[in-house]
Structure formats: structure tokens, C-alpha cells
Amino acid sequence: MLKELITKSRSYRRFFEDESISKEILKELIELARLSPSARNAQPLKYFLSNTPELNEKIFPHLTWAGYLKDWDGPVKGERPSAYIILLHDTEIANNYFCDDGIATQSILLGAAEKGLGGCIIGAVNRLKLQSSLTIPDRYKIIHVIALGKPKEIIQLEEMKENDYKYWRDSQHVHHVPKRNLEDLII
């Protein structure tokens, strides 16, 4: 069951934008992050939740999508995320969040997959402009953004060839993701 969730938890970049995600579901995903391990148990992460078209419109322009897809500027209207979770580092709790962002994000994305949703971790964020646009206080520093929605695309995992790890899309818009062989990972 866990392997199935991990396999379903891909970096989706196109969604059915009109399929809304309730605030309650977003809170359920944050609850999974809250219950996850935290380095030193400091729990310095906070979360900004967005699930309205108005608020989502403030977030989208500050994100850059799919660096390997040079001819694609990101999802078009109607295919954009219906919700976002912005991970924040609360600098008044601790000066370092160590690996907490990865742990929390994985918990959130596995929870989303379990609910039939998909997500994408976006690290290419104009953090200062986004923080200003959302009037997030200075004590919080944006780590990354998780885009969420009902997936509109098919993602196909495939064997990596010749160390070519770049994902790509075919003419049918299927998103191909090369993965290294298990034998190549174990030393």
C-alpha cells in the first residue's frame, strides 16, 4: 500500500483547476505533517493555505514551472492548481529547520495521493515578491510551495538510460520520468 502511494505521488503540473480542495482537506494534510518527525522536535515549520481562486491568483505569478520543459511556461488557465500549501520557516522558533521540510512535504504529498490528489513541490519561487503579495510577516521565510489539485496529466515512470535523468513530455502530453535502477543505487 505504501509503495503504491509513493508511486502515485509524482510531480503533477497540470490539474483540473475547477475541482476545488476544501480547507478541511488542506488541514488534514497539515495534520499529517504535524504528526511527522521533526529534527530536535523543534517543529519550526508553519503553513500558509490557499484554496480560493482569488488567493491562488496571487501565488501563481511568483512560481516557475518545470525547468526541463523549455517550451512550456507552466499550466494554462483551467489547468492550474486549485490549492497551494506554502511551507514557512518560523525563525522565532529555531534558526534552522534541518530536514523537516522534506519530511513534512513527503507526508503532505502522500496524504494528497491517498485522497486522489496530486501535487508538485515548487522550489523556483520569487520568495520576496510572494511574501509581500500575501503580506506574510517577516519572521516567516518561504521554503517552497506545494501546488495541489486533481491531476490532469498522466505520468509514466521508466527506466533511466545512459544517466539521462531529465523528464520530458511526448506528443500526447504524457509526462515521462526516468528512474535509476535499484541495483545502481545500492553500494
Image (cartoon, helix red, strand yellow):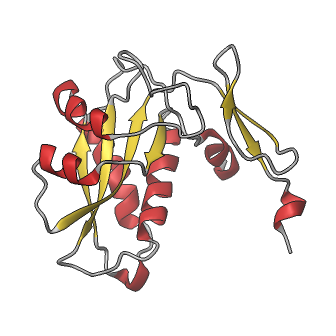
Q: Is residue 134 visible?
A: no
- Indicate the position of residue 3 as horizontal and vertical percent values: 69, 50
- Residue 137, compared with residue 54, is above or below; it is below
Relative to 130, 147 lies left or right? right
Q: Is residue 167 visible?
A: yes
**Depth order, front residue of 141/152:** 141
- Indicate the position of residue 173 as horizontal and vertical percent values: 63, 18
Name which residue lies at 41% across and 75% down.
38
Name which residue lies at 67% across and 38% down.
167
- Residue 22, compared with residue 38, is above or below; it is above
- Indicate the position of residue 115 as horizontal and vertical percent values: 47, 36
Name which residue lies at 34% across and 17% down.
18
Relative to 12, 144 lies left or right? left
**Depth order, front residue of 131/107:** 131
Name which residue lies at 34% across and 64% down.
34
- Residue 108, compared with residue 93, is above or below; it is above
Give the quarter of the image for residue 25. top left
Relative to 145, 95 lies left or right? left
Relative to 63, 92 lies left or right? left
Q: Residue furthest front?
A: 70
Q: Quadrant of the C terminus?
A: bottom right
**Depth order, front residue of 81/131:** 131
- Indicate the position of residue 69 as horizontal and vertical percent values: 58, 32
Number of marks in picture: 0
